[in-house]
Amino acid sequence: MPFDRWCSSMRVLVLDRDVDFRLMVSQILAIEWPDVEVEEYAVDEAALQSRSFKLAEFDIVIVGCPAEDGSFDGARPFVQRRDVPATVLVGADAVNDELAGSARHAAISFLPRTAVNRRCLVAAVNDSQTRRREWEQRRNRTGSFDPQLKVTRSGNYTRYAASVNDLGIRGYRTVNEIGEGGMSRVFLARREKDGLELVLKVLDHGLTKEDGVLQRFMHEYQIVSDIVSPHVVKIYDQGFTDEHVFIAMEYFPGGDLKRAMREAFAPKRAMTLLLEIALALDVIHGVGIVHRDLKPHNVMFRADRTLALVDFGVSKLAASDNMITLDGEVLGTPFYMSPEQAQGKAVDRRADLYSLGVLFFEMLTGRKPFVASSVTQLLHKHIHEPVPALPESITVLQRLVNKLMAKRPEDRFQNSGELIAYVSDRWGNGSAAVTGATSRSA
């Protein structure tokens, strides 16, 4: 059974020397499993044999051969660890029975490096997960199953204790670890000089020896550090120690829109959020930034319930031609992806407005406008299928949703200012648009 049919979420650790290989693998995973969380590092044999990686927190580990000659000899201590999850090994040889026999379990798939394409990698991931599940079932039946070897798939992963002070970052004191990004560990911390609570993203660049990883980590700082707006995450600081790179940014105690959107919002609330997100987009578009990954996880709330956009990891400057692509598809989140982005075409601020339309539909209805059993089918719907109808009680908003989600960029609002003016001209602050309309309250 494919992994995405029997597990609601997936966390993947990608380890390889080559930054381009890691990027390719990360993109394949993001396209095939839209909600995947990927953490990736450049490693050599010594790093692979260390205990730095908390493997029990991952569902899958994808390991490129640590040796220069493409062999897996250096991976032996790694696969013998008690906490190793299902594993895909990628190297010069497609099969290595001796290594598999020495592993803690039989949940290992092998791929030759030349065979790493979307179809083969997805098959290897599914195969290793199936092997892992079968192995766990056998251990359960024998009565000798060690619960420490089980892979947690609930999303409530064990947090390992660490102090930012212990990591040598002066001026900040850790409160607790609150998550992990694609290349970093994320901490809630206090700034010692004034007690301000903030978020520290910490990259252990002792595990990264390639400039490309560092540049990608610093991209978010570089792209938004000069923006001063209540609608965009505040970046306070960035720096280097002997062991780490860090970015200090605003903490949002109110959580994200995904957490708030457990069911449909009342239409008035949805309209208010639409306008606030449009204002946020207007700020970043005004300085030439296209977000390219607008989704509920990237809309965060402060304690006073004001919101800001976060996570500019795949953003780009509108004037730049540098895009992250893979086989004609663009890195992003397929549920919220514009038709032009789904086709690998150039995107501008109108792509963000399409994503906002998808968010608005979801806020109004409690469901996404397009769902499918595969990413390919989902992207096809974004490109070709008409916007679904809103519930009868709020059909007054259908025209607005349709214009936001128009298939052709030229048929949408051309900028956030047009959207804000459209709403203001017809409904003032938006509340008149939904007078008498009913919906479940969020």
Image (tube, rainbow, N blue to C red):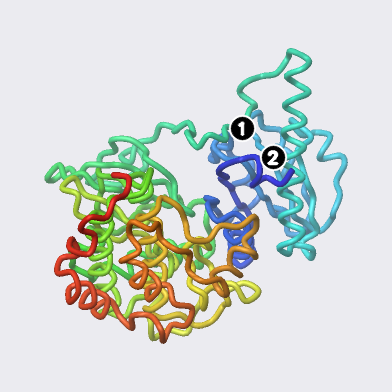
Place residue 80 in its image quadrant. Answer: top right
Is 322 above or below relative to 224?
below
The three-letter amino acid code for the residue at tag 2 is: Ala
Q: Dot 1 corresponds to which residue?
A: 151
Label for residue 406?
none
The front one of 136 and 396 is: 396
Real-space Cα separation, disc 1 to disc 2, in angstroms: 9 Å
At horizontal 49% and vertical 34% (from top left) the residue drawn is: 157
Q: Is residue 204 left or right of residue 278?
A: right
Residue 392 in picture, x, y percent from top left: 38, 58
Q: Residue furthest top?
A: 143
Cβ atoms at labels 1 and 2 below 8 Å apart: yes
The front one of 71 and 337 is: 337
Place residue 113 in its image quadrant. Answer: bottom right
Q: Dot 2 corresponds to which residue?
A: 86
Residue 428 in picture, x, y percent from top left: 14, 69
**Which comes sooner in the sequence, label 1 or label 2?**
2
The three-letter amino acid code for the residue at tag 1 is: Val
Is 403 above or below relative to 359?
below
> Label 1 crowding class (10 Å Cα cut-off): few <14, some 14-19, many 20+?
many
Label 1 element class: loop
Q: Is residue 185 visible?
A: yes
Place residue 364 in its image quadrant. Answer: bottom left
Question: What is the quadrant of the C terminus in the image?
Answer: top left
Q: Is residue 17 visible?
A: no
Residue 63 in picture, x, y percent from top left: 68, 50
Residue 374 in picture, x, y percent from top left: 65, 58
Total residue callouts: 2
At horizontal 30% and vertical 42% (from top left) the residue drawn is: 188
Q: Is residue 167 left or right of residue 346?
A: left
